[in-house]
Image (tube, helix red, strand yellow):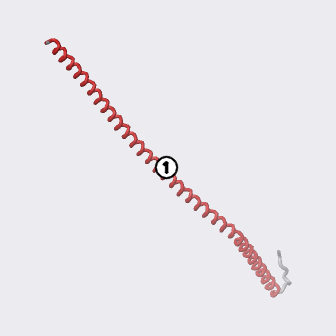
C-alpha cells in the first residue's frame, strides 16, 4: 500500500510500533493456543503411555503363565513317560518271570514223564524176571 508523502515521520513510527505490537500479540496468542493444545494432548499421551505399559505388563504376565503351563505340561509328560517306561519294564520282567516259571513247569512235567517211563520200564523188567 503506498503511503502518502504528507504523513509525518512520527505517524509512520507509531504505525510501525503498532504493527510490531500486533505481530507480537498474534505470536503470543498462537503460542498460548499451542500450549493449551499441548496440555490437552499431554493427558492423552500420558493415558496412551499408561495403556501401552499395561498392555506390555499383561503380555509379560501371559508369557509367564504360558511358560509355567508349558513347564508343567513338560513335567507331566516326563512323569508319564517315566511311568510308562517303569510299567513296560515291570511288564517285561513279569513276562520273563512267567516264561521262566512256564519253562520250569514244562521241565518238571518232562522229568515226571521220564521218571514215570523209567519206573514203568523197571516194573516191567521186574515182572519179567519173576
How many numbered markers are drawn?
A: 1
| Quarter of the picture holding the N terminus | bottom right
Q: Secondary structure at mark 1?
A: helix
* Vertical relation: 28 (above or below) 92: below
- At horizontal 22% and vertical 19% (from top left) the residue drawn is 117
Instruction: Tell me residue 70's x, y (percent).
Output: 50, 51
Q: Residues within 10 Å of mark 1 (few under 14, many from 20)?
A: few
Could you say where residue 57 lies in the image, as x and y percent from the top left? Answer: 58, 62
For the C terminus, the quadrant is top left
Quarter of image, res 50: bottom right
Residue at screen point 80% across, 85% down: 14
In this rendered view, identify the residue nearer to me: 122 or 82: 122
Q: Which residue is mark 1?
A: 73
Q: Observer-nearest residue: 70 or 9?
A: 70
Q: Residue furthest front?
A: 130
Q: Position of residue 82 (x, y in %)?
A: 41, 45
Q: Residue furthest left?
A: 129
Residue nearest the observer in this picture, 64 or 99? 99
Left or right of 115 in this view: 82: right
Question: Residue at coordinates 74% horizontally, 76% vertically from top-left?
Answer: 32
Q: Name the image quarter holding residue 54.
A: bottom right
Q: Residue at x 86, y 84 (%)?
A: 6
Image location (x, y in percent) of residue 101? 31, 32
- 124 sits left or right of 35 in the view: left
Identity of the residue furthest to the bottom in this view: 10
Most foreground residue, 62 or 84 = 84
The answer to whether residue 43 is above or below residue 11 is above
Give the side of residue 62 with respect to residue 88, left or right.
right
Amino acid at each position: 500500500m503506498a503511503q502518502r508523502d504528507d504523513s509525518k515521520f512520527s505517524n509512520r513510527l507509531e504505525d510501525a510500533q503498532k504493527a510490531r505490537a500486533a505481530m507480537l500479540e498474534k505470536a503470543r496468542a498462537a503460542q498460548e493456543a499451542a500450549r493449551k493444545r499441548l496440555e490437552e494432548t499431554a493427558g492423552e499421551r500420558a493415558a496412551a503411555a499408561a495403556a501401552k505399559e499395561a498392555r506390555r505388563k499383561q503380555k509379560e504376565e501371559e508369557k509367564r503363565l504360558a511358560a509355567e503351563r508349558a513347564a508343567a505340561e513338560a513335567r507331566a509328560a516326563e512323569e508319564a513317560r517315566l511311568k510308562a517306561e517303569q510299567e513296560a519294564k515291570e511288564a517285561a520282567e513279569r513276562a520273563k518271570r512267567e516264561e521262566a516259571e512256564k519253562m520250569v513247569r514244562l521241565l518238571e512235567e518232562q522229568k515226571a514223564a521220564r521218571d514215570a517211563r523209567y519206573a514203568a520200564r523197571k516194573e516191567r523188567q521186574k515182572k519179567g524176571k519173576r
